[in-house]
């Protein structure tokens, strides 16, 4: 987790300043260890992570935001070539991911510009 946090680039805050760390971190219960929560709090990052263990209430309220990430990952899983890595080099695998991201964005933009409930004549 420390290496991941150290790899976060500078983040613009909307006022022209650059922050060196995020304000909050969303994650599922897989990251709910006490030492991860303590590490985040020591760095001044508010953890929005459900704690691990029995008796911890399941409804953390994070599902609305986390669903967006899960849905996007499912879209990437729809590309058969990315499900199992057939590429010989990491650069090729990264290029296939970038291509998949372009296709996903193009499909989303097409749906926004041409909603199904409007008849376009095509």
Image (spheres, rainbow, N blue to C red):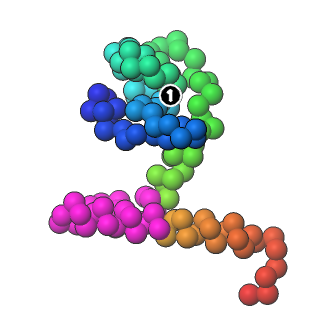
Is 21 displayed left or right of 93 in the figure? right
Against 89, is 118 above or below?
below
Residue occupied by mark 1? 23
Foreground residue, 15 or 47?
A: 15
Residues drawn in magenta: 76-102
Residue 6 quadrant: top left
Residue 21 quadrant: top left
Residue extending furthest toward the bottom: 122
Q: Residue at x 69, y 66 (%)?
A: 112
Foreground residue, 69 or 43?
A: 43
Question: How far across and how far down the image is residue 8, in percent?
Answer: 36, 38
Q: Residue at x 60, y 35 (%)?
A: 63
Foreground residue, 95 or 117?
A: 95
Residue 37 seen anywhere in this rendered image of the structure? no
Is 29 displayed left or right of 57 in the figure? left
Main secondary structure type of the part rendered in magenta: helix
Question: How far across and how far down the image is residue 108, in percent?
Answer: 60, 65
Q: Residue at x 17, y 66 (%)?
A: 88
């Amino acid at each position: 987790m420390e290496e991941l946090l150290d790899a976060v680039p500078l983040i613009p805050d909307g006022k022209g300043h650059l922050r060196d760390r995020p304000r909050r971190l969303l994650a599922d219960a897989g990251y709910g260890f006490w030492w991860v929560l303590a590490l985040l709090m020591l760095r001044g990052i508010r953890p929005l992570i459900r704690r691990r263990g029995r008796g911890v209430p399941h409804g953390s309220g994070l599902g609305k935001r986390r669903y967006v990430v899960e849905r996007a990952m499912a879209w990437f899983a729809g590309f058969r070539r990315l499900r199992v890595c057939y590429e010989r080099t990491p650069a090729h695998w990264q290029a296939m991911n970038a291509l998949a991201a372009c296709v996903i964005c193009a499909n989303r933009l097409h749906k926004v510009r041409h909603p199904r409930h409007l008849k376009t004549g095509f």
